Amino acid sequence: MNIGVIGAGAVATFLLKEINQNQLDNLRIKSVLVRDTEKYRLLESKFGVKLYTDLNSFLDSEIDIVVEAANIQAVKSLLPPVIKKKDVVVISVGALADETLLNEISNPVKQHKYTVHLPSGAIGGLDLLQNAHALGKVSSVSLTTRKPAISLIDEDIQEAKVVFEGKAIDAIKQFPKNMNISILLSLAGVGIEKTRVCLVADPHIEKNIHQVDITGEFGEATFFITNHPLPENPKTSYLAAMSILGTLKRINGKLRIGG
């Protein structure tokens, strides 16, 4: 399967190393969409890719699927035209808190054969949540995220402090770079108005810690995830980057576990 990547930051570099440099079976990144080809020219010789600045030329290149590894703004501007031509994997899912955008991309997906894949990012348990809510019988979903204080606030604090508590839709508006996972939980379960979020700035931790609590007719479930940072960029979760790779491998495979 030939892949096109939007963006050339830490996540894109991780994918280029794991897929192209390590010659991952049956996967190959062929094209990379960037804003400045000269800035990233080294990627062409190092990983054997072709750089593009024009979206249409990028989409018309030798690729089967597109991976967005950029940011929320890239999703808002590029996703609608991309899904008219290619399947796409989206990591900056916070953009889908915009109901207008969500509706805009949902309609073409229904009209055409192309699919939007949303990797699980920095958390787990989404398959359980989706299955438990298959009959609409999940009653509550909550997310408690603890992050190093320095990554959330400028204030010098000595003890853990709750910096947000409320609906997922409001969490992503106030902390767009930190609350992508709350949107994933919302889409998989009870929606952005009903999914509850608590965000804690903690000066005593160095890693992100997530707790997901789900209640419904199926019973109860709780997940704890402690994330190591991506070596190339401490601000990015290692698991979030790996979830894209895992998604691509599942799409390309014949045996699909879970879901």
Image (cartoon, rainbow, N blue to C red):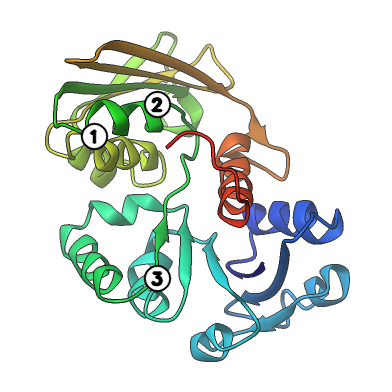
Crowding at dot 2, Cα within 10 Å, few <14 / some 14-19 / many 20+, comes out as few
User: Identity of the amino acid at label 2?
Assistant: Glu
User: Identity of the amino acid at label 3?
Assistant: Tyr
Chain-order first, disc 1 or disc 2: 2
- Expressed as whole percent of the image width and height from the top left, the position of residue 246 reads 61, 44
Question: What residue did someone put label 2 on?
Answer: 155
Crowding at dot 3, Cα within 10 Å, few <14 / some 14-19 / many 20+, comes out as some
Question: What residue did someone put label 1 on?
Answer: 189
- Residue 153 seen in the current view: no
**Callout 1: SS:** loop
- Real-space CA distance between mark 1 and mark 3, rounded to the nearest whole angstrom: 23 Å
Crowding at dot 1, Cα within 10 Å, few <14 / some 14-19 / many 20+, comes out as many
Question: What residue did someone put label 3 on?
Answer: 114
- Expressed as whole percent of the image width and height from the top left, the position of residue 152 reads 42, 32
Q: Quadrant of residue 110?
A: bottom left
- Real-space CA distance between mark 2 and mark 3, rounded to the nearest whole angstrom: 45 Å
Chain-order first, disc 1 or disc 3: 3
